[in-house]
Amino acid sequence: MFKHHSNDSLPGSLKKRAGQNRLSRYAHNTLPIRKHIPKNSPFSSRNQSYNSTSLIPHSQTLLEIPDISLLSPNELPSIEENSRLILSPSRKTVMEWSLLLTSQGISSTILYPYRRRWFLKVADKDHQSAQQLIRIYTHENRHFQGYRKLHAEKVLFNWGTLYWALPTGLSYWLNFVSHERLSAAGALSSMRFLEDGEWYRLITATFLHADIGHLASNLSIGFPLMGLAMGQYGIGWTLLGTLAAGIIGNLMSLGLHKNEFIGLGASGVIMGSLGLLAVHLFPLMGNNNLGTRLAINSLSAAGFIFILTGLSPDPQVDIPAHFGGFIGGILAGIILNRLPSSYLHHTLTNVILTIFWFTLCSCCWWIAIEK
């Protein structure tokens, strides 16, 4: 392994190290600048000059490491005289920095958090080189900060999925005790929709199921998918987005079935939640190669899940409704991704949208039962 010492400049193109080729470009087109370490800093060495020269690229502004000189001596852990400390903003960051320095042949020690702060201890002779490498590493990975922030603000799973699961289960029970009166009033009938204009069946049919096995299958798949989608987009936005996807799925089913048919089930809504998850990483596309790969991988994974769960040789499975719901969810996700994250997860907005979703579905059922 190539050893990097404090008196050496960063390796050029003729001194590339395995896995560190990107660092080599900073060895060219550099100029020295003077940096001053305060004399009262507890980390200033007796045998080392306070002024040090480091190599900083032209036209590049490297991100600064937290200034440890702002801390009082009581806020710092005790170390050996020939050692220096580097302050890290978090546990994850100090682990990344330690791995970086180890890969460059610089020995470092992660100190246990002292007064809720993380420190990295290095030898005095390696201190300047370690700081320079950390600055370059932080600069080159600056584009990934947006990705980390994007996911830190979102909940992985949202139990608001119960707002969808409970009405769906209740609809099946009411249909069972009423001897399938709800199915007769709300199932998607091509003849009733096309000839009588009963548009509300596009919505009411998404709450109905043929039997307990049909219900259990949809709930077991839809419950986690809806919860994950709500974690990314918010409860109200997800309920409306998946409902729109279910409507698109039912319309596609009506358009592709030539003969008269009756359809029911929440599969279009569930495939809509899968479509929402398929594109939830699309905002990362264009920022960097990693973001684009993650977005493509997410879409590919959702496509495979759709093949496993949405396609079936069983003639009773309404594949057009599944496919239409999946496409509808993707379209809804693309639209929602254009909204600010703070707007998607705004509590009052999601409450209003959830009430609107519940009111819309209730009105459709009231029209179906009264008619």
Image (cartoon, rainbow, N blue to C red):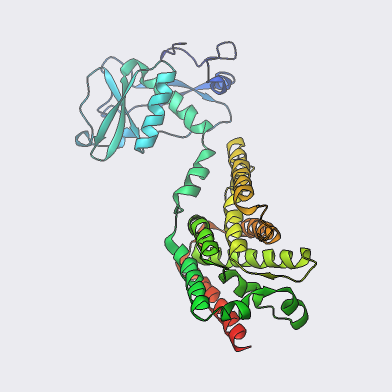
Relative side of 26 to 106, left or right? right
Up the image or down, 113 lies above or below 247; here it is above
Q: Residue furthest bottom?
A: 370
Image spot of residue 65 (x, y percent): 40, 33
User: Residue 293 occupies which quadrant of the picture?
Assistant: top right
Q: Residue at x 49, y 57 (%)?
A: 220
Residue 60 visible in the snapshot: yes
Image spot of residue 127 (x, y percent): 36, 21
Q: Residue at x 54, y 38 (%)?
A: 143
Count numbered badges in the picture: 0
Tell which of 150 and 210 is nearer to you.
210
Image spot of residue 34 (x, y percent): 44, 24
Tell which of 229 and 339 is nearer to you.
229
Up the image or down, 123 lies above or below 87; here it is above
Q: Residue at x 48, y 61 (%)?
A: 345
Relative side of 46 to 239, left or right? left
Q: Residue at x 56, y 78 (%)?
A: 180
Residue 34 visible in the snapshot: no
Relative side of 192 to 364, left or right? right
In the picture, the quarter occupied by the C terminus is bottom right
Image spot of residue 47 (x, y percent): 28, 14
